């Protein structure tokens, strides 16, 4: 697994609409400090994969396996900035 960076690889996966919408719920998708908290990252991952409902983003399009794996690799790689 190559080093996965939040700024370079993860943050661009979220649309401006995703970021704006989720901020209203206290979910700071564009904030590395917030996203790098293990519980937050796990919850976001589970909503994206459909392990928790409602699946994100609401109504799709849902992330493909490559994007989901990138998020998983970033989490497993230690939440690199």
Image (spheres, grey):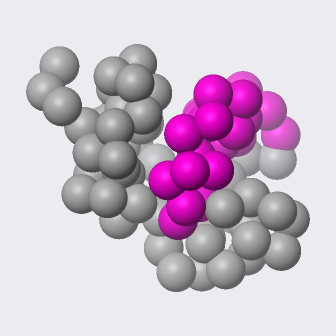
Looking at the rendering, in which quadrant would you find the N terminus? top left
Magenta stretch, overall SS: helix
- Does residue 7 appear left or right of residue 72 in this picture? left
Q: In front here: 53 or 7? A: 7
| Point 79% across, 33% down: residue | 52
Q: How many marks?
A: 0
- Does residue 48 appear left or right of residue 25 in this picture? left
Residue 25 vertical position relative to residue 70 in the rendered view, above or below: below
Q: Residue furthest left?
A: 2
* Magenta-drawn segment: 29-53
| Point 72% across, 46% down: residue | 55
Quick check: can you spot residue 20?
yes
Residue 32 vertical position relative to residue 19 in the rendered view, above or below: above
The image position of residue 32, as x and y in percent, is 50, 53
The image position of residue 21, as x and y in percent, is 73, 76
Residue 28 picture quarter: bottom right
39 part of magenta stretch: yes
- Does residue 13 appear left or right of residue 56 in this picture? left
| Point 56% across, 50% down: residue | 33
The image position of residue 56, as x and y in percent, is 67, 53
79 part of magenta stretch: no
């Amino acid at each position: 697994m190559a080093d996965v960076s939040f700024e370079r690889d993860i943050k661009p996966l979220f649309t401006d609409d995703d970021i704006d919408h989720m901020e209203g719920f206290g979910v700071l998708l564009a904030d590395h400090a917030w996203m790098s908290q293990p519980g937050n990252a796990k919850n976001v991952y589970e909503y994206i994969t459909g392990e928790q409902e409602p699946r994100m983003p609401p109504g799709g399009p849902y992330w493909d396996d490559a994007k989901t794996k990138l998020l998983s690799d970033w989490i497993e790689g230690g939440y690199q900035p």
